[in-house]
Image: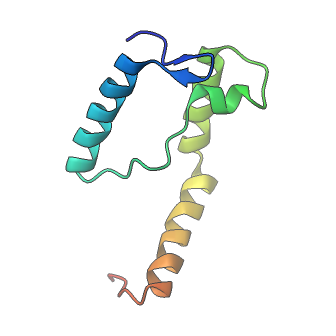
């Protein structure tokens, strides 16, 4: 895949490829509306793309972060009047 962004504009071929990948993920039940990119990390941390990937990897493997996501999922379910499974 060529560079995804060229001066902060997505390259047309990459845009099509990315949308095809997102379509496949959605088809299989994945939530794809909040994805993180190394550029998100690099916007606040001075690092190369490999270090940025490591930051994201450790972030999303973090027990606290995952615990907060699961707890928030239950709160949102209750706000939507959905029954929690036991």
Give x and y (percent) for residue 58: 60, 35
- Identified at 50% across, 65% down, the residue is 70
Determine whether, in the image, residue 43 is placed left or right of residue 81: right
Give x and y (percent) for residue 27: 20, 48
- Identified at 32% across, 34% down, the residue is 19
Question: From the viewer's perspective, is residue 16 above or below residue 82?
Answer: above
Residue situated in front as seen by the camera: 46 or 71: 46
Quadrant in which the N terminus appears: top left
- Identified at 26% across, 41% down, the residue is 23
Residue situated in front as seen by the camera: 59 or 1: 1
Question: From the viewer's perspective, is residue 47 above or below residue 32?
Answer: above
Based on the displayed image, in which of its 4 quarters is residue 67 positioned?
bottom right
Q: Give the colour scheme shown.
A: rainbow
Residue situated in front as seen by the camera: 35 or 66: 35
Question: From the viewer's perspective, is residue 49 above or below residue 39?
Answer: above
- Identified at 39% across, 47% down, the residue is 32
Based on the displayed image, in which of its 4 quarters is residue 37 positioned?
top right
Quadrant in which the C terminus appears: bottom left
Determine whether, in the image, residue 29 is placed left or right of residue 37: left
């Amino acid at each position: 895949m060529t560079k995804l962004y060229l001066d902060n504009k997505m390259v047309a071929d990459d845009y099509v490829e990315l949308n095809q990948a997102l379509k496949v993920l959605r088809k299989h039940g994945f939530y794809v509306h909040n994805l993180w990119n190394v550029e998100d990390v690099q916007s606040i941390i001075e690092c190369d793309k490999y270090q940025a990937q490591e930051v994201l990897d450790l972030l999303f493997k973090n027990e606290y972060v995952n615990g907060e996501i699961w707890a928030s999922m239950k709160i949102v379910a209750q706000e939507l009047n959905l029954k929690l499974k036991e």
